Amino acid sequence: MREHVMRYLAPALLCLLAVACGGDFSNDDLEFQNALPQRQDLAAKLPDAAARSGQGLRSQRVGLQALGGTSALAMESYAAGTRFNTSVDALLSLLELFRNAPPTTRETDRRIWGPYPADDHPGHELRFVMERQGAQFAYLLQYRPKGGSEDAWWTYLPGTFKADGGIRKGEGTLALDLKAARAHGFDTGDATSLDRLDIGYQTRALPTRVELLFTGAGATLPLTRYASRQVPEGLGEMAFRLPGTDLIPGGLLETLDILARWTPDGRGVLVLNILEGDAKGAKYTECWDSRTRITFLRRNWDFLNPTEGDASTCPDVSALEP
C-alpha cells in the first residue's frame, strides 16, 4: 500500500523536474523555503546493521521467539522503518523540487510557483502556493483544468508549519488527498484503496517525532499508523501495529502493538502488546545484539519460565523516554 503511493507520485515528479532549475533567492524566499520539511528531518534513522544485511527491505514471518535466534521482530521493525521512509520520501520529493526553484510570484506574505502544465494530467495545470502569518506557514499543491478560473483550483497536497526554535525547527503537517484527486477525474493507480495519507511531525525538541497515517477508501479513521522518534546520538524508535500475526499457537491470529528502539550499531529492545487474538492482553519484551540475535526475552503469560537470557545485555535507550 505504501509503495503504491510512491508509484503514483512518480509521474508527477517527472513533470516538475523542469521547474527545479535554480535561480536567485531573497532572504525572505529562504524563510518560506525553510518552512518546508526535508528528508533528513522526517526519515526514520535505521541502524547501520539493518542496511548492511538488507533487513530493512522485507517483512519476516513473526512467531514465538527463541533465545539466541535471529529476531524476526527486529527485522519486522526495520522493514516497517523502510516502508515508513518510502512513503515520507514520496511526499517530500514533491516539496523539495519547489524548494530548489525561485517563486514565480512574490508578495509580502505569499509566494507562488506556477502555474505550470501538468504533463502527467493532460489538460490540467498546477501551482504551489505558500502563505505566511507570523511564524506560521501554510502551503498547497493545487491543480485545475487548463485556463480555468481562480475558483477552479483544488488542493492535492496541503501542509502547515509553525516555526519554533531555529531553522526548520517546529511543528508541521502535510497530506496527500487521493480522494479529492479521484473526484476530479485523476487516476490514482494502485492507490485506489487509500483516501488519504497524513504526516504530522515536531522537530523543535528532542526526541523528534514523525507520525504517518493511512486512511483507507471510505474509512473515517486511519487504518494504518506508524510513528518514528530519534535523537542526534543515533538512537531510533518505530511504533506500529501489526495485524493478522500468528504469534501464539491457537485458533486466532494476533494484532500486535510494537514499540522498537535501537542503537546505531543495531542493538535493540522491543516491547510488544497483544491487542487481539489467542493471548489478548499479553505483553512480550525482547532485546537483541548487533547481529539481531535475541539476548533476552520476557513473556508475562509464561508463569513457569517468564524470562530467559541476560537483561543487562539490553541497550540503554533511555534518551527516547517521553
Image (spheres, rainbow, N blue to C red):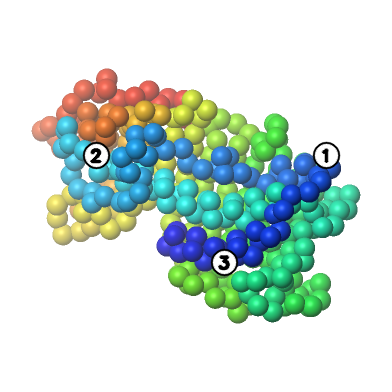
Say which quarter of the image contains residue 77.
Answer: top left
Q: Nearer the viewer, mark 2 or mark 3?
A: 3
Tag 3 residue? 11
Q: How many marks?
A: 3
Question: Dot 1: what SS?
Answer: helix
Image coordinates for residue 268, horizontal then vertical, percent = 33, 31
Q: Is residue 234 left or right of residue 121?
A: left
| Badge number at residue 36 | none
Three-letter amino acid code at the position of disc 2: Ser
Distance from label 2 to label 3 (Cα)?
38 Å
Residue 152 visible within the image? yes
Q: Earlier in the sequence, mark 3 or mark 1?
A: 3
The answer to whether the residues at label 2 and label 1 have Cβ atoms under 8 Å apart is: no
Residue ID for mark 1: 27
Task: Calculate the distance from the C-alpha at mark 2 to the C-alpha at mark 1.
Answer: 50 Å
Name the amino acid, label 3: Pro
Tag 3–tag 1 contact (CB < 8 Å) = no
Q: SS at mark 2?
A: loop
Q: Secondary structure at mark 3?
A: helix
Q: Is residue 154 above or below residue 223?
A: below
Q: Amino acid at mark 1?
A: Asn
Q: Is residue 190 left or right of residue 284?
A: right
Q: Which residue is mark 2?
A: 71
Q: Residue at x 60, y 31 (%)?
A: 205
Q: Earlier along the polypeptide chain: callout 2 or callout 3? A: 3
